[in-house]
Amino acid sequence: MKYFDDIQVGDRFELGSYRFTAPDIKAFAGRFDPQRFHLDEDEAKRSHFGALCASGWHTAAVFMRLLVAYRKREAEAARRRGEPIATVGPAPGFRNLKWQKPVYVDDTITYASEVIEMRASNSRPRWGLMTSRASGVNQHGETVMTFEATAFVERRPGQA
Amino acid sequence: MKYFDDIQVGDRFELGSYRFTAPDIKAFAGRFDPQRFHLDEDEAKRSHFGALCASGWHTAAVFMRLLVAYRKREAEAARRRGEPIATVGPAPGFRNLKWQKPVYVDDTITYASEVIEMRASNSRPRWGLMTSRASGVNQHGETVMTFEATAFVERRPGQA
């Protein structure tokens, strides 16, 4: 991760894409969201979704998976360049999670995170607060999920 | 589910409890949140959490699992009594998800949902909007997770 002082509002991180296959949708739903429209094609056809679709929690969990993988790639690249890596605190929660559209079988969702607010922390001067808007967009360009999260990001040494 | 007209602010639904074992925590994290403090006891000891703990997304997904199971039990009980079952629309998202405390190995989290607002829908007169506050509490009585969600709930026939 970059230091707080090297990140600006509007910075956008492309986290990658994920294709939701039917076995994958059913495996997650069987474990965490066993509703008929996430488990069975025929029952899903008769539901208001009209076809098998992923649990919203599955769509959100895949965001986390791609975020962690993105941060690992970034940290490795910085290490190779001999650059220091800033620490990011865990996000203590999220705001306004919205599932705008269903994620159907074989939809490919492309995830990103865009910085919408940066502010110094009064209580912890070595850290800043970064607020980002996470999003998932399907192969038709339709947004399927958004939420906002705030995390502590380390300040560049000497900047606090 | 009860009809909108039979639910009141303050109604509380006890969804049940779930124990987070180490293999379970690691299996979820390996798939969706592969950070060291969710995957490896020794590395977790050296992290700011101090011990292996569950991904926040795992804690949230288990809420959904218990909610679905609760609704199925309620629907079956109503069916046995010969009572009608109101339809609940899917929640299009949630607000203010907070992870207040880590969920450590073998913590047992008890989940509940409490109604905090009920209002009729102007746009869809056969439905009402129910806002609930979801919570998870550990075996020490500490809240580990909360969020708020709003869902459409069917009105009793003739009440709209």
Image (spheres, coloured by chain):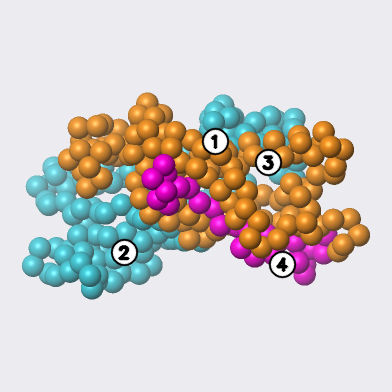
Chain colours: A orange, B cyan
Q: Do residues under tags 1 and 4 come within 8 Å of each other at their CB atoms?
A: no
Q: Do residues under tags 1 and 2 come within 8 Å of each other at their CB atoms?
A: no
Q: Which residue is mark 3?
A: A71
User: How far is disc 2 from disc 4 in space, using C-alphas?
Assistant: 35 Å
Determine the secondary structure under disc 3. Answer: helix
Please state the extent of the stretch shown in magenta in the rendering. A115-143
Q: Amino acid at mark 2?
A: Met
Q: Residues within 10 Å of mark 2 (few under 14, many from 20)?
A: many
Please tell me if label 2 and label 4 are on a single chain.
Answer: no
Please tell me if label 1 and label 2 are on a single chain.
Answer: yes
A121 is within the stretch colored magenta: yes
Between B141 and A75, the one lying in front of the other is: A75
Residue displayed at 26% across by 54% down: B89
User: How far is disc 2 from disc 3 in space, using C-alphas?
Assistant: 38 Å
Q: Which residue is mark 4?
A: A119
Determine the secondary structure under disc 1. Answer: helix
Residue B32 shows which numbered tag? Answer: 1
Residue A146 image offset from top left, x and y in percent: 48, 54
Residue A142 image offset from top left, x and y in percent: 40, 50
Residue displayed at 68% across by 59% down: A130
User: How far is disc 4 from disc 3 in space, using C-alphas?
Assistant: 21 Å
Q: Which residue is mark 2?
A: B130
Residue B43, quarter of the rendered image: top right
Residue B109 image offset from top left, x and y in percent: 50, 44
